[in-house]
Image (cartoon, rainbow, N blue to C red):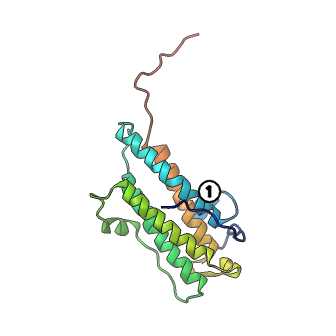
Amino acid sequence: MSHITAEPHFRTGRPLPGEYADYASEDIAGVPGDDAIEALAQLAAHTPPTLRLLASAAEGGLTDRPQKWTLEALLSHLIDDERILAHRVLRVAASESGEQPAHDEYRYAARRSLEDRRLDDLLAEYGTTRAETLGILRDLPAAAWTRRGPVDGHAWSVRGLAFHIAGHEIRHLRLVCERHITLRDPQPKSRRRS
C-alpha cells in the first residue's frame, strides 16, 4: 500500500465544546494540531510500525501484563470504530435526519474471527479503511465540517467525529504501549550505596 499523506486542503479546525459528547473530550484533547485530516494521515504512518514493534517485542517474551485484547483484536476494534464513525461523518455531512444510535464495541469484536488473521493482514485492512476515511473527509466542502447531527444522544459536528477517530486511536496506542508491553531487564542492576 502506498503511503497516505495529508494532501493540501483547508484546515478543518479543532472541534469546540458542544461539537461532541463530553465522554469524547479527553480523546479529542489528545489529538495534536488543528486539522483532522492531517492528524489521521500522520496516524496512518505511525500506527502500523508501532504495532509491528509491539508485536515483535511480544514475540521476544517482553509482555508481562495481562492484555484486555490481543494486538490483532485491538486493531480490529480500531478498524470497526473508524468505519462506524466515518459512516456517521457521511450522514451528518449530508444533513441526514434521524438519530444515530450508540454501538456496542464488544458485539462488533465478537463478530470477527481473528484466530487465522495475521497482524499484517489487519494492518492492510487498517490502511484501506484509513484511505477510505481520508477520501470521505477530503471530499467535504468547508461548510460541512461544522455541520451537526444527532449521534448517540449528542449533537456531533463532522470535525468532532473526525477528531474522535484520531483521538480514540491515539488513546488505544498510548494504553497498549504503557500497559501491555513492558520491557524487562533480565539482569537488574544492583543498587549502589553511597
Q: Position of residue 62 (x, y in %)?
A: 39, 37
Res. 21 in view: no
Q: Residue furthest front?
A: 2
- Residue beneath label 1, please? 30
The amino acid type of the residue labelled 1 equals Gly
Task: Return the residue found at the far top.
Answer: 194
Q: Is residue 3 visible?
A: yes
Observer-nearest residue: 1 or 138?
A: 1
| Residue at (53, 55) in percent of width and height | 171
Q: Is residue 85 above or below residue 123?
A: below
- Up-down relation of residue 183 to residue 22 (above or below): above
Q: Secondary structure at mark 1?
A: loop
Q: Residue at x 52, y 68 (%)?
A: 131
- Residue at 35%, 65% in the rendered image: 109
Q: Quadrant of the C terminus?
A: top right
Q: Position of residue 90 (x, y in %)?
A: 55, 80
Q: Position of residue 110 (x, y in %)?
A: 31, 66
Identity of the residue drawn at 38% across and 42% down: 58
- State which quadrant residue 92 falls in: bottom right
